[in-house]
Amino acid sequence: MVIVTDVYQKILGAGASPQVLLVLGGLTMALVMALVMAACAIVFTWMERKVAGFMQSRYGPMRVGHWHGVAQPVADMLKILQKEDIIPAEADKFFFRVAPLIIFLGSLLAWAAIPFAPGFVAADLDLGLFYIFAVSGLAVIGILMAGWASNNKWALYGAARGAAQIVSYEIPIALAAIPVVMYTGSLNMNDIVHAQQGGVAGWFLLRNPFLFLAFLIYFICSIAEVNRTPFDLPETESELVAGYHTEYTGMRFAFFFLAEYANLFLVSCIATAVFLGGWQNPVPGVNVAPGLVFVVKATVLVFLQMWMRWTLPRLRVDQLMYVCWKVMIPLSLVCVVGAGIWMMVLGQLAH
């Protein structure tokens, strides 16, 4: 935001009102974040198809765009724009229309506090990490709304599963981030990144064993948060057709699809900022654009999530909840207590 407002300051001159600069900067960053979400859907759908093809000893898309089917996502986008928008006759039409927008909005709002580079963050909030976890919870409302409004039993089952899954896994995710907050003494995302200077050795991932375990807990639970295999119970096609968005077509379905891949990248960005040093270059002294460093780290995490999707079988619903309540939550509590004792003994607690 600082960079954007500085640009507008130069364009409009020294007499520009601070309020005008703030509004223009906010609108510009909102547009940038929306474009980032669209880019996630375009890039990661192609990437997932290629990763899946590699895992299954095939090529994936190869024709559209010549080089490895690089234009296939664009063709898919043009195709979905031409699809008929159908609303079931017995659906609650108002909530049916609003649900995809709420899921999209929850993802868009969360992007505001992600620091991609020094000074390049839409909202540099003191409670940035808390804010991200809070607004991302809007997805639960959208999922429940979509399932209920569809007037379809499969959609309703998927919505109930989705709400239970997301609400449950939010607990270990939040607990896994607490040791980092204890270390930095701040919920500000920029402060968390700045606290990880000094190359790879400065990353919270490698500060102590409990922080490493916290990262693993966060990474596994984040896959459940974005409904990805092996935790894709809300939309498991072998049981529920497509889950809570079974009745959606055209652009309304595209909003769900867009939010899924945007959230895939979002949880990777959070992990990058909280555990992997954010934009900090892992090799000090090498001149690389901070934003590029951040995106590469997050993309590696996205690749790992895709790898898991095409490697592991889906869990049952009871296994899903067992992993959360009887494995992840106790382990995350151990991380909080263990990291606190470790830091206290070594005198590393934030003052």
Image (cartoon, rainbow, N blue to C red):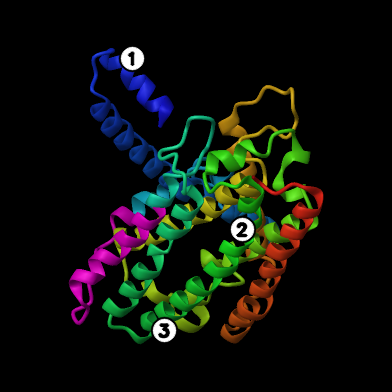
Q: Earlier in the sequence, mark 3 or mark 1?
A: 1
Across and down, in percent, residue 118 comes to: 53, 30
Task: Residue type at mark 1: give it.
Answer: Lys
CA separation in Å, label 3 and label 1: 54 Å
Residue at x-position 40% and y-position 69%? 140
122 to 186, vertically: above or below: above
Across and down, in percent, residue 157 comes to: 41, 84
CA separation in Å, label 3 and label 2: 33 Å
Q: Is residue 92 magenta?
A: yes
Q: Which residue is mark 1?
A: 10
Q: Which residue is mark 2?
A: 178
CA separation in Å, label 2 and label 1: 40 Å
Q: Earlier in the sequence, mark 2 or mark 1?
A: 1
Q: Nearer the viewer, mark 3 or mark 1?
A: 1
Across and down, in percent, residue 102 comes to: 32, 61
For the residue labelled by badge 3, is the local secondary structure a helix, a strand or a loop? helix
Read off the magenta span.
Answer: 80-107
Q: Which quarter of the rendered picture does the C terminus lie within?
A: top right
Seen from the viewer's position, the closer of residues 246 and 208 is: 208
Task: Residue type at mark 3: give it.
Answer: Tyr
Is residue 57 something one can see in this rendering?
no
Residue at x-position 52% and y-position 67%? 170
For the residue labelled by badge 2, is the local secondary structure a helix, a strand or a loop? helix
260 to 200, vertically: above or below: below
For the residue labelled by badge 1, is the local secondary structure a helix, a strand or a loop? helix
Seen from the viewer's position, the closer of residues 262 and 205 is: 205
CB atoms of marks 3 and 1 within 8 Å: no
- Left or right: 51 as drawn, with respect to 126: right
Q: Nearer the viewer, mark 3 or mark 2?
A: 2
Q: Which residue is mark 3?
A: 157
Seen from the viewer's position, the closer of residues 163 and 75 is: 163
SS assignment for the magenta stretch, majority: helix
